[in-house]
Image (cartoon, rainbow, N blue to C red):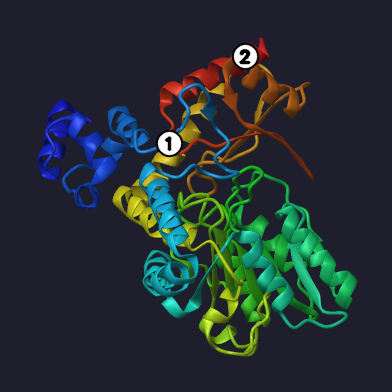
Amino acid sequence: MSAHARREFFKKTGLFSAAGLFAGFQSSTALANLLRNSSGIADESLITDEDFWYQVQQSFTVSPSLINLNNGGVSPAPRTVQEAMKRYYDYSNETPSYYMWRILDQGREPLRQQLARLAGCQADEIAINRNSSEGLETVIFGLTLSSGDEVVASRQDYPNMINAWNQRVIRNGIKMVWVNLELPSEDEDYLVRQYVNAFTSKTKVVHLTHVINWNGQVLPVKKIAQEAHRRGIEVVVDGAHSFAHLDFKIPELEADYFATSLHKWLYAPIGSGMLYVKKEKIAGLYPLFANDSPRSEDIRKFEALGTRPFFIEQAIGKAIEFNEMLGMARKQKRLHYLKNYWMEKVRAFPGVQLHTSLDPAWGCAIGNMSVEGKTPGELDRFLLEKYKVHTVAIQWENINGIRVTPNVYTTTRQLDQFIEGVRAFTK
């Protein structure tokens, strides 16, 4: 961003210094809304403006002595979210049975409305829970399936989901049909065909991971879902890494069921999640935690968790505000820029192999790389011990490498340190 453009940006937001911007991120929702709604500054300018994103970094309390490039596991929450959670926790402890159940619990319906707005669906299609696994296992164990019914899924899906489906094999005699994807891929026809070729007249469900956590591969979920629905097959989507990461609305995927962890890309408190069930599918899905109306058409039947951490749940609203302030399209572009920033540099080093697409249609923040002749664990340990860079070693099916996941608080200066570490490792 040019100096003139920056001055104009500060004028439009009512700020005239970087210090003012810092203060706004910390304390003023009104100012955050002004930032979100500012116009006249092209995203292309903001995406690469390190001054701007340095100020975003100040909204977090991340350690300056450790560079966290494993945001794919769980993301830290902004300071405003942390403070809200702590405030609600203290409030709850004044008189738990009163303040939790009679006061804080009343905030779930407004929160449901907020999540529905972000997801682009009806509020009565959203249930609030603790994570993707809980949401997806509600679906996996709640669907009515009989012996011999087939479910198509990928060997690159998340282990918790694979284990859940395998438990239904043991208990109910269903048949799992596994596809094994060669990744990364930018071939939509190939990816769709792997699933469609696995469909038979006995296929009842297809399980899709929107963004594969091991290497950040984006699947063409909508195209596969359309093929499935033509054959009367229900569609379950694992959106753990896509919601608030990619700029989309859930109904656009044409999924029947969708679950996500809000403590990943939405930056909500750890232990918060969301389940979407298409309106007409709610009655036929049994809840994971029993209630007195298991065949009800009310989405709230999936929220019978017993005593729950209301203080975590209510702080989700501050995370929504933070994301809307940044703007989802702008956020996605920045995350993709950061991934490509490091990948385009390390690809020239000897022995480096990239396992994630640089095309924004097929990847975003999550990247995976390896060094020929070295194990992922060796590279992961070297980066942590010598450069204080935290990544994660991945060895799952046919994906082997370190997963590198920057976030909105990551600066290119920090990525330069990671790049230097990879350079040293490959010498």
Quadrant placement of the N terminus: top left
Q: Amino acid at mark 2?
A: Lys
Where is residue 374? Give x, y as percent: 76, 22
Asked whether residue 30 is in view, the answer is yes
Q: Secondary structure at mark 2?
A: helix
- Residue located at (49% from left, 50% from top): 265
Q: Secondary structure at mark 1?
A: helix
- Residue located at (58% from left, 69% from top): 307
Relative to residue 143, is residue 42 depicted above or below? above
Task: From the viewer's perspective, tell me whether residue 167 is left or right of residue 361.
Answer: right
Query: Mark 1 Cα within 10 Å, few/some/many (few <14, many 20+)?
Result: some
Q: Amino acid at mark 1?
A: Tyr
Residue in front for this viewpoint, 366 or 361: 366
Quadrant placement of the C terminus: top right
- Quarter location, residue 92: bottom left
Where is residue 315? Give x, y as percent: 42, 57
Any mark on residue 386, and which?
2
Any mark on residue 337, and which?
1
As drawn, the residue found furthest toward the front would be 95
